[in-house]
Image (tube, rainbow, N blue to C red):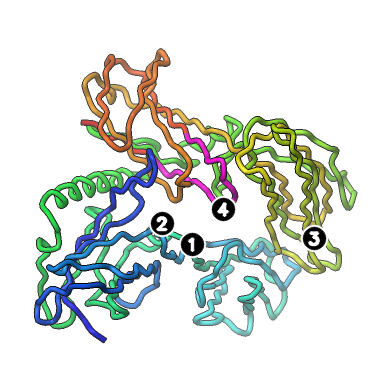
């Protein structure tokens, strides 16, 4: 085990991943010296970990950087945040008690589940993998790691009706977004050749800088030496200032839109009606699996008193590429009956090619709480679809049954800008915030006046505005999904910030 003296500067990276996207990686630059203060040269293997506390705490993120080359002064740099794994925290409802049942089951929606992270509570009793039950005589939980299934048991009779049982756990997601959204604090540890260097250092949103102190024997570190050049440091300071401004505006989460003399921010949520605009425009946002697409929902009715139902054949026309067809089901059967559902039809492409499809899902006896999502993907990716036919059948013993067809269509949202914010001769730059973005998709923005005239606004450089100082300006944002979008590639916009100078 070998330790070094390490100094570092951590900033948001400005690498342009794709046109009109915000920086999504984090630059880590520093200088590495040995115990005698001499620069370390050559190649070293780096790795980083992020926790929610300065010591102990919960591991939120890990990433193996791999081999990094150090120059003759021990200076190195790398980027992180894109290929690691976040341990994202989520809470799901297991069931609501009905006054008669004593056993309740739920298959966790997400995977992979982080080991030893599952806990269950009904407001009276609690259980966790690490500490067990708060009352072993009254309440217990069994968790199957292979099935991701939580089974809650009441040992001395059914609980009163109306009690909500929830489960909280962590699961692995790609990228650093989930980690930064979890925990009130973020502390980073850096490893060199498998040895953690010094103590963890706080990662701050403003100015989002992390100073890694000297490890073990050394007591001070010279941060100035970690910047390869004054020009680079100046540019990074500008980037940090913009990130800090975005963070400050985002802190005003309860406000639908906020502005200062030099910025305007809008954060996309149900609170400010952003997603309502999506629904109104015939486009759809799935809160659990966010996509931007046009969605058609196919209904399969059940007559009153009947045990099953079927739909007639329906034809949906489109001139866009197909994203996928999806069947989501959740069983409500707590008996010996087996619920199920199926859909089938034909995809007809604009070039005349056809693709028959079918999806079905059935559940066994006493399958209450089990759920699944099944997909059909297009065989001709990116080719426009002429129409899709669909029909289906289902039983009554499903608490959820949703059949949907998703098309890739451009998404347009217009946001009113504050009076006086847009003025002749001022320059503007726009920043987008995403929890996840498809690199092959495209985002464009324009400032539109009350006559409908539109002027593009850039995300990579300042754009001077030429026009009247009248009110009534709007920001028009257009997102065009990539032709290859599927359920694995999702874009989830969080907000937009316009900077003015």
Q: Which of 118 and 239 is in front in this view?
A: 239
CB under 8 Å between discs 4 and 3? no
Q: Residue 488 carries which label?
A: 4
Question: Looking at the picture, does residue 290 appear above or below residue 387?
Answer: below
Give the distance between the C-alpha atoms of the residues marked 4 and 2, in whole angstroms.
16 Å
Viewer-nearest of discs 4 and 3: 4
CB under 8 Å between discs 2 and 3? no
Q: What stretch is highlighted in magenta?
A: 479-495
Viewer-nearest of discs 4 and 1: 4
Give the distance between the C-alpha atoms of the residues marked 1 and 3, in whole angstroms.
28 Å
* Residue at the disc numbered 2: 177
Q: Which of marks 4 and 1 is nearer the N terminus?
A: 1
* Residue at the disc numbered 3: 362
Give the distance between the C-alpha atoms of the residues marked 4 and 3, in whole angstroms.
24 Å
The outermost residue toward the right is 306
Q: Position of residue 125 (x, y in %)?
A: 57, 74
């Amino acid at each position: 085990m070998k330790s070094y003296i390490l100094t570092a500067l951590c900033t948001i990276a400005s690498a342009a991943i794709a046109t009109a996207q915000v920086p999504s990686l984090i630059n880590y630059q520093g200088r590495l010296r040995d115990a005698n203060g001499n620069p370390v040269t050559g190649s070293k293997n780096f790795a980083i970990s992020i926790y929610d506390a300065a010591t102990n705490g919960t591991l939120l993120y890990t990433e193996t950087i791999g081999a990094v080359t150090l120059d003759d002064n021990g200076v190195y740099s790398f980027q992180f945040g894109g290929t690691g794994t976040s341990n994202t925290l989520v809470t799901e409802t297991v069931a609501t008690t009905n006054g008669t049942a004593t056993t309740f089951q739920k298959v966790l929606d997400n995977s992979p589940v982080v080991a030893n992270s599952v806990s269950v509570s009904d407001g009276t009793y609690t259980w966790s993998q690490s500490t067990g039950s708060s009352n072993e005589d009254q309440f217990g939980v069994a968790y199957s790691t292979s099935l991701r299934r939580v089974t809650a048991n009441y040992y001395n009779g059914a609980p009163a009706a109306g009690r909500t049982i929830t489960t909280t756990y962590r699961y692995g997601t790609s990228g650093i977004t989930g980690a930064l959204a979890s925990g009130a604090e973020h502390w980073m540890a850096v490893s060199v050749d498998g040895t953690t260097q010094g103590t963890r250092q706080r990662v701050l949103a403003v100015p989002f800088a992390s100073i890694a102190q000297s490890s073990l024997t050394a007591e001070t570190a010279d941060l100035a030496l970690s910047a390869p050049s004054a020009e680079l440091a100046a540019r990074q300071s500008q980037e940090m200032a913009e990130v800090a401004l975005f963070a400050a505006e985002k802190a005003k989460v309860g406000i639908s839109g906020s502005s200062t003399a030099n910025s305007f921010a809008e954060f996309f949520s149900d609170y400010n009606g952003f997603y309502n605009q999506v629904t109104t425009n015939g486009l759809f946002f799935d809160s659990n699996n966010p996509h931007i697409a046009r969605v058609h929902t196919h209904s399969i009715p059940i007559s009153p008193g009947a045990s099953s139902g079927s739909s007639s054949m329906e034809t949906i026309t489109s001139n866009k590429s197909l994203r996928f067809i999806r069947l989501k089901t959740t069983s409500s059967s707590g008996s010996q009956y087996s619920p199920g559902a199926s859909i089938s039809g034909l995809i007809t492409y604009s070039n005349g090619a056809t693709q028959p499809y079918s999806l079905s899902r059935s559940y066994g006896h006493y399958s209450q709480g089990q759920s699944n999502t099944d997909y059909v993907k297009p065989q001709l990716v990116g080719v426009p679809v002429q129409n899709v036919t669909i029909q289906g059948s289902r039983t009554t013993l499903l608490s959820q049954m949703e059949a949907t067809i998703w098309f890739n269509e451009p998404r347009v949202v217009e946001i009113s800008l504050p009076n006086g914010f847009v003025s002749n001769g001022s320059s503007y730059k726009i920043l987008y915030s995403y929890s996840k973005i498809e690199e092959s998709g495209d985002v464009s923005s324009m400032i539109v006046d009350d006559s409908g005239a539109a002027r593009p606004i850039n995300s990579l450089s300042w754009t001077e505005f030429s026009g009247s100082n009248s009110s009534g300006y709007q920001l028009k944002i257009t997102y065009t999904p990539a032709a290859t979008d599927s359920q694995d590639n999702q874009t989830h916009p969080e907000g937009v910030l316009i900077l003015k100078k």
